[in-house]
Amino acid sequence: MFRLAHISDIHLGPLPRLTPRELASKRITGYINWHRNRRKRLFGNILESLLADIKSAAPDHVAITGDLVNLGAKAEIAAVADWLPDVGEPDFVSVVPGNHDAYVPGSFKLACRAWRPYMLGDDKPASSAGENLFPFLRVRGQLALIGVSTAHATPPFMASGIFDRRQAHLLSDILRQAEDDGLFRIVLIHHPPVRGATSMHKRMLGIGLFSRVLEKAGAELVLHGHTHLDTLYRLPGRGGDVPVVCVPSASEAPGGNRPASGYNLISVDGGPGAWTSRLERHGLVARSGRFELVHSQEL
């Protein structure tokens, strides 16, 4: 059995001091939103408690599906690079970026450069950078972890993502080869590849492309973030429906409009043609102040 922990939307805080030049962009709206809203809901000690609980569960690997920072600032990206070893070594942790990691032009390249060891596919040279990192393939035990990027800079008040034809073509090839190799295929992506899963200004462009890839090549599971919700959808795939699972923000405090901090633990067993997988949702429970198993189901 292989056990994968899934976290997302870290939004590592607090915000660093930003220069007037850094704020003279889309960042000014995000900066105001942070101080008015987000900083009241996201707390570092919650994230530390979540990581401690994950470590006590002793998963075989950790997947992080984007939005590790808030405004894509250089100091934030460097802080995440210092934080990631607290989660684990690059071989133990796989990361895909989110829209906040590409908040303004240039942020995406900085993030890919700083977090490259956690985004590097098994067959990619260490010099790979930017969009050339994605999609990546990492084989861990009987799992094929396939990382896709939907991150790109957007105008103010937009948080959309893009899944393009280049990635669609490569993802299809990876999925087919992984099936031939007898692996349980998990796609990691930030934006939900499901119509209606989020508002128009936050949606993923290229949902149709992604759906066609699943219909033709298949997959066993898709993990995403972005909405900060504990949702489960299913998309048609070759050979059967594919579960599409989201997780709350790893840093969310209780009492808000969205679920409190949580992580998913996915257990995979069996083999080709006879895979079994189980989803356990672990969430921060306000009355106890601890992370507890709040839901469990077969996928």
Image (cartoon, grey):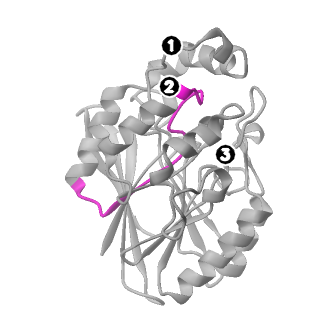
Residue underneath mark 1: 17
**Relative vertical location of residue 195 with respect to residue 38 in this rendering, above or below:** below
The amino acid type of the residue labelled 2 equals: Ala
Q: Earlier in the sequence, mark 1 or mark 3?
A: 1
Disc 2: CA contacts within 10 A as few (<14), some (14-19) or many (>=20):
some
**Relative vertical location of residue 239 with respect to residue 139 in this rendering, above or below:** below
Q: CA distance from mark 3 to mark 2?
A: 19 Å
Residue underneath mark 2: 75
Q: Earlier in the sequence, mark 3 or mark 2?
A: 2
Residue reaching furthest front?
127
Residue 94 falls in which quadrant of the image?
bottom left
Disc 3: CA contacts within 10 A as few (<14), some (14-19) or many (>=20):
many
Residue underneath mark 3: 151
Q: Earlier in the sequence, mark 2 or mark 1?
A: 1
Magenta span: 57-75
Question: For the residues carrying marks 3 and 2, which lies nearer the camera in this image?
Answer: 2
What residue is at 67 percent from the left and 57 percent from the top?
Answer: 193
Q: CA distance from mark 1 to mark 3?
A: 24 Å
| Secondary structure under the numbered disc 1 in the rendered image | loop
Asked whether residue 210 is drawn in magenta, I would say no
